Image (cartoon, coloured by chain):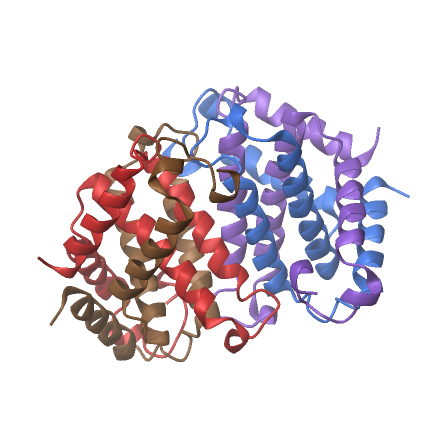
Chain colours: A red, B brown, C purple, D blue
Amino acid sequence: MSDFKEVIETLRKFRDDRDWNQFHNPKDLALAINVEASELLELFLWKNWDEANKDKVKEELADIFAYAFLLAEKYEFDVKEIVFEKIQINTEKYPVEKAKGTAKKYNEL
Amino acid sequence: MSDFKEVIETLRKFRDDRDWNQFHNPKDLALAINVEASELLELFLWKNWDEANKDKVKEELADIFAYAFLLAEKYEFDVKEIVFEKIQINTEKYPVEKAKGTAKKYNEL
Amino acid sequence: MSDFKEVIETLRKFRDDRDWNQFHNPKDLALAINVEASELLELFLWKNWDEANKDKVKEELADIFAYAFLLAEKYEFDVKEIVFEKIQINTEKYPVEKAKGTAKKYNEL
Amino acid sequence: MSDFKEVIETLRKFRDDRDWNQFHNPKDLALAINVEASELLELFLWKNWDEANKDKVKEELADIFAYAFLLAEKYEFDVKEIVFEKIQINTEKYPVEKAKGTAKKYNEL
């Protein structure tokens, strides 16, 4: 079994053991990802990046991954595939010769 | 090579080809995850969950994964490991007998 | 009429002229605030604070205020009152002698 | 003194009594608004809008207003003016005859 499948299977079991699928519609999963993303953000608030607590970053990042995998599962997305598709799109939006060394958005390049 | 490693390697190559590592400090990566999480959220705004555009959900979710993997790479976190560690923590916070069928937070159970 | 009332009245008229009250339940207004807050955040992404475009900051901040006022209107909160109440709470959480010059959260003081 | 000025003056005094201006650069204020917006969002997570705790909504909304006013203060924006300017922009983006009764974005009208 691939790593992705193994993680998703484990998350699904955790969820179903608690009968939580009833709450996990995609809209609320999107909310959950935002809530966790903000808890990650808070670890850097009023600080330089190297002052954030690494163990807490680990936990909040894990929460983001967990809900992101559960949302992927809902739509039956293959995570590796959708990330590779998006990299392909971004390769066209951000050609190396234009995008190299600049943080500008594609519509400002 | 594991799926996770393969995705991270591909993202790293995309980033380094564009010389973007200089912008990718953990604080800004946390910002980027939040920006992408909100773009996902916007797809559900003023709508029921089943009215969101599935193709756009796919793209925004891929962006969240991409920045989440790049942040994991920064800290050299093993994604499978940190998700499994968090599931372990949540198994203790949300024991099946207490958490089954309720969406309450652990501190309200 | 107070400034707050005048702003809320103008926003309410804009909303009702378009028959948008039907979409503006508090949950979606909370989503909207998050979406706008992230658009503000994106103006600072990969940048120092003084590199953000001031005119765009103005627009995004105005959007946040607009939805925040519309949510206050839904619950019939008096904005001045709720902000003053919260300052009172924070005055107790962050007593000057403990909080002065530190960015720590109240539970770490 | 206008309501807005009174609120901003009170927030500024609270901040300066604690010598917190040193942390309040616009980028971190934008982060703070996002963190508070997400705490508001969490009150609606896995719930219908009418199941959220109204007292907590009041507190989180007050926090959003507080940081939004402090960011406005940084840039010396007049809050009433910037909201009215944005309503003017939106009046053009969303003409009544096109936007009435639909939640579509202006670029889809």
Q: In which quarter of the image is the N terminus of chain D?
A: top right
Q: Is residue D51 above or below residue C109?
A: above
Is C11 on the left or on the right of A73, as rendered? right
Residue at the image point whose x is 22% and y is 66% from the top: A91
Give the x, y percent position of residue C82.
Answer: 75, 38
Residue at the image point whose x is 49% and y is 38% from the top: C31
Q: In which quarter of the image is the C terminus of chain D?
A: top left
Give the x, y percent position of residue B72.
Answer: 33, 69
Q: Nearer the viewer, residue C3 or C106?
A: C106
Is B61 on the left or on the right of B94, as rendered? left
Kindly tell me whether residue C11 is visible in this rendering.
yes
Is A9 on the left or on the right of B29, as rendered? left
Is D83 on the left or on the right of A102, as rendered? right
Give the x, y percent position of residue B40.
Answer: 36, 46
The part of the image, by quadrant, that contains residue A95 is bottom left
Q: Which of B42 and A72 is in front in this view?
A: A72
Find the residue positioned furthest to the front: B97
Q: In this view, does D81 lie above or below C29?
A: below
Give the x, y percent position of residue A57.
Answer: 44, 66
Find the residue positioned furthest to the right: D1
Q: Which of C86 and A18 is in front in this view?
A: A18
Residue at the image point whose x is 50% and y is 52% from the top: C39
Q: Is residue B72 above or below residue B54?
A: below
